[in-house]
Image (cartoon, rainbow, N blue to C red):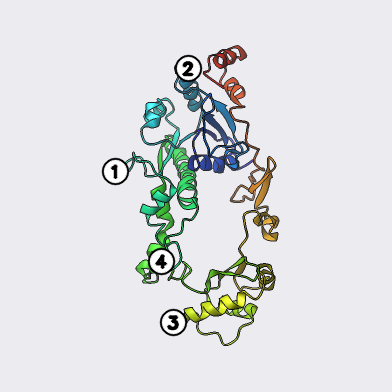
Amino acid sequence: MGPLAGLKVVELAGLAPAPFACTVLADLGADVVRVDRAKPGFDVLSFPNDPLTRGRRWIGVDMKSPEGLDLVLRLVDEADVLVEGFRPGVAERMGLGPDALLARNPGLVYGRITGWGQDGPLAPAAGHDINYIAISGALEPIGQAGAKPTVPLNLLGDFGGGGLMLAMGVLAALFERQSSGRGQVVDASMVDGAALLTTSLFGLRNLGLWNKPRGENLLDGGAPFYDTYETSDGKYVAVGAIETRFFGELVKVLGLEDVPDHLNPENWPALRDLFGATLRTRTRDEWAKLAEGTDACLSPVLTPEEAPSHPHNVARATFVEVGGITQPAPAPKFSRTVPPVPAPPSQARADTSAVLGELGLSEAEISRLRAAGTVA
């Protein structure tokens, strides 16, 4: 049983950030019920056995019908948490806004996630991860010197600054509820979350340690001892030997002598050329083998397909197989309340009858609602 065993969460089906937050909660033991439309619609980002829908039950309800809306309200009445990822105002128009739900269930933690936030001049506008991290200040510093900013997948906005921050906010609100007995709204904005992820960057800038253009600073690839290098097989290694002691270990692994002071930026161009030429003499895995057992801070850059087989990841069970698909395991790890391997994703809307039965509906009532198209 995970540490969140007994926590009841209702998820109004959406894309990426909200499902990821609910995956985190489900991974840690929460009972998550995903509420989707009664009839499937076209959604290019939704697919069977999606890891982002693992570990929860899935029902289909026509929330536009009075009976369907009543069913969802009854489900929320018994929940600790509701999560939605609609644009501002959409949940209110559906009759599922926080005022309505908190009036019925004062202890409810109402988690909502958007790109821009619930207010502000951009709140009603469309956008995606790249737009949110652009105005947060998180995108501009990422990339090579003299090149345009590099898109870091959708990890900073959707998942790091979005879904993960929402899950943390929900847990914080649940902790506060223990003393107040009251729920509240958690307004998670991907702009806010991505900006928070840059906190250390603001500290470095204040100290004058990050004052050069993109790709010319200590941790953005500007320093030759904190960068990636191509190897003889066309693959890459990552080097992160910042401290003098670790840099010394790296130099030994590379078989170099009389290397100039690495902390003097004037030496960086020569060091980069030296490291590049040296690392191209062996394969990625040969360098990784040479670095084993040292503090050289040299690691192979693995593909997502390769990562699950790395001995360290195998030893820590960092990846698991769920429904025949290898994917990241729940994190972090716990000493007592160890989360089980997540259950495979349900078939779309497959748990409708079981969940409605738990609300007290009879088989005859469920059959009538299904015939009317109110439920899947």
Which marked residue is nearer to the observer: mark 4 or mark 2? Answer: 4
Please tell me in which quadrant of the rendered image residue 356 appears: top right
Q: Nearer the viewer, residue 180 or 196?
A: 196
**Mark 4 → mark 2, Cα distance in angstroms:** 56 Å
Q: Secondary structure at mark 2?
A: helix
Q: Is disc 4 in contact with disc 3, using a CB cutoff of under 8 Å? A: no
Residue shown at 40%/71% (left/top)?
Answer: 209
- What type is the residue that disc 3 sits on? Glu
Which marked residue is nearer to the observer: mark 1 or mark 2? Answer: 1
Report crowding for label 1: few under 14, some 14 to 19, many 20 or more residues within 10 A (C-alpha): few
Residue shown at 32%/43% (left/top)?
Answer: 122
Residue 121's mark? 1
Give residue 161's position: percent from left, percent from top.
45, 50
Using the image, determine if residue 303 lies above or below residue 220: above
**Mark 1 → mark 2, Cα distance in angstroms:** 36 Å
**Mark 1 → mark 4, Cα distance in angstroms:** 29 Å
Give residue 271's position: percent from left, percent from top.
52, 80
Using the image, determine if residue 207 lies above or below residue 124: below
Q: Which residue is mark 3?
A: 266
- What type is the residue that disc 2 sits on? Glu
Residue shown at 64%/47% (left/top)?
Answer: 327
Give residue 270's position: percent from left, percent from top.
50, 81
Give residue 228's position: percent from left, percent from top.
55, 68
Q: Nearer the viewer, residue 376 or 91?
A: 376
Q: Nearer the viewer, residue 294 or 212?
A: 212
Q: Is disc 2 in contact with disc 3, using a CB cutoff of under 8 Å? A: no
Q: Which residue is mark 4?
A: 214
Q: Can residue 55 be seen? A: yes
Q: Which residue is mark 2?
A: 67
Q: Nearer the viewer, residue 36 or 29?
A: 36
Q: Is disc 3 in contact with disc 1, using a CB cutoff of under 8 Å? A: no
- What type is the residue that disc 1 sits on? Pro
